[in-house]
Amino acid sequence: MIETIERMLSDLERGRLSRRQFAVSLAALAASASLPPVARATPAPTGFRAVSINHVTVRVPDLHRTSQFYQGFFGMPLKQQSATIHILGVGDSSFFGIEQDESKTAAVSHYDFGMANFNADEVRAKLTERGLKFDGNSKESFKFYDPDGFHVQVNPPDYVGHVS
């Protein structure tokens, strides 16, 4: 447990973990330490399977500076854009989203898993059973908050994103 806490502190100090995420993770770790081993067992599988990391989206203070960096440094082509969002291609089927944000601090907005045989209603039902909140009612793609507060998007593996 000490190694886990040290790793979390290191992530906090390096900005990879927000104070909120650190506090929630530390509380969950402490709570799980007092549980009997049976209670810490892995939850029953849902039957769903993530088959790709479809995309990661970040929020940044300067959309164009960040977009130009990733296009130039990593050779990511601009696939879609609006005044506040750029979608850059990564390989054949993944992408990197960049959103303009008023904050002076860059942050991960969300990450997305492509799921085999994606059925939005079935995924929402399993999330509801686990007491997790989700956004919207799209059949194509939607976001939810995982137990640690991360914003996670799910959809079929071939999802290409949309700018607004």
Image (cartoon, grey):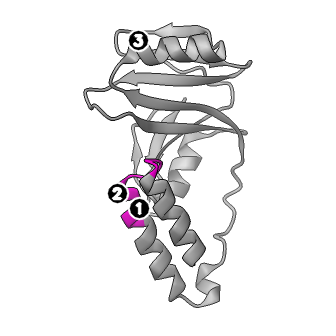
Residue at the (57%, 37%) spot, across then down: 112
Helix, strand or loop under label 1: helix
What residue would you read off at disc 3? 64
**Callouts 3 and 1 close, C-beta under 8 Å:** no
Foreground: 31 or 115?
31
User: Does the segment drawn in magenta span residue 88?
Assistant: no
Q: Which corner quadrant of the image does residue 74 belong to?
A: top right
Helix, strand or loop under label 3: helix
What residue would you read off at disc 1? 22
Q: Which corner quadrant of the image does residue 104 belong to?
A: top left
Q: Quadrant of the C terminus?
A: top left
Q: Which mark is residue 19?
A: 2
Q: CA distance from mark 3 to mark 1?
A: 31 Å
Q: Which residues are magenta?
A: 14-24
Q: CA distance from mark 2 to mark 3?
A: 28 Å
Of the image marks 3 and 1, the number of the one nearer the N terminus: 1
Q: Position of residue 84 (x, y in %)?
A: 35, 15
Q: Position of residue 61 (x, y in %)?
A: 32, 24
